[in-house]
Image (spheres, rainbow, N blue to C red):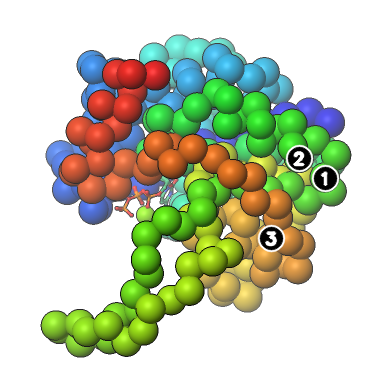
Amino acid sequence: PKRWLIVPAAGIGRRMQAECPKQYLRIQSRFILDITLSRLLDSVAFDGCMVSLNPSDQWWVSTEASADERISTCLGGHERSDSVLAALQALSERASPDDWVLVHDAARPCVHPADLERLITVLADHPVGGLLAAPVSDTLKRGTGSDVPEVAETVDRRGLWRALTPQMFRYGLLTEALQSAGREQHPVTDESSALEFFGKMPVLVEGRTDNIKVTVPADLELAGFLLSRS
Ligand code: CTP
Ligand code: MG
């Protein structure tokens, strides 16, 4: 099977509250999106890479990636899952149902080559696919929904994982699962949720906890620190 990379980069980064979408903020003078793409493309061979962009994107043209002939772009959609589905559709002429698709958030520049390689190796013969994930280490509380929340209960964290990316699935199954979730208006915040809703249970592959998603301003400094030492 072939191996494709999809990087959804069509979000606006509302929680980052920056003057541009967070994937176009710079760390050590490079765009986050360029760091993310080069870390992935320089560690593993892909048959193609599709980046979903916001229709009002005005920064992509200035990236290093825009001059990289391995990379194609398409227009993303309203939700992250729409952006991933748009990228899958843009690959439809070239991809077969059994091919592998790795989906990785543009906003996770600290992804480690060793994690990427392990995900691919562990899932090699699997019919569905799986995702990088990290066991939850904090004690978890469910809060009451009030203005000054109180603890309603402590949630047993045994068996709980935080979903990371990349998430890697068979092209045909992932496309069908996302389409089905869309038709049934089932909310999907990652590829795995779509597969689960479709009745296909993904494999959890333990990944590094420093594969953070840059989401709020404090994450930017943390990502800069992590990248300075890897
Ligand atoms: N994304 C996308 N299309 C969307 C929404 C998100 O391609 N309609 C991408 C983002 O660009 C990001 C990844 O999905 O790389 C993870 O989403 P998230 O961290 O939520 O990014 P944003 O949606 O941009 O941030 P926020 O939710 O704070 O607005
Ligand atoms: Mg979002």
Point out the image quarter for the C terminus.
top left
Relative horizontal placement of residue 194, taking residue 170 as reference (left or right): left
Going by the numbered disc 1, the residue's amino acid type is: His
Which type of secondary structure does the marked residue at label 3 adopt?
Answer: helix
- Sequence-wise, which precedes: disc 3 or disc 1? 1
> Which quadrant would residue 115 be assigned to in this image?
top right
Going by the numbered disc 2, the residue's amino acid type is: Leu
Q: CA distance from mark 1 to mark 2?
A: 5 Å
Name the residue tied to disc 1. 126
Name the residue tied to disc 3. 195
Q: Which residue is pictured at 68% across the width and 48% down the height?
A: 130
Disc 2 versus disc 3: nearer the observer: 2
Mark 3 surroundings: few (<14), some (14-19) or many (≥20) residues within 10 A:
many
Disc 3 versus disc 1: nearer the observer: 1
Residue 216 shows in the view:
yes
Mark number for residue 123?
Answer: 2
Q: CA distance from mark 3 to mark 1?
A: 14 Å
Which type of secondary structure does the marked residue at label 1 adopt?
Answer: loop
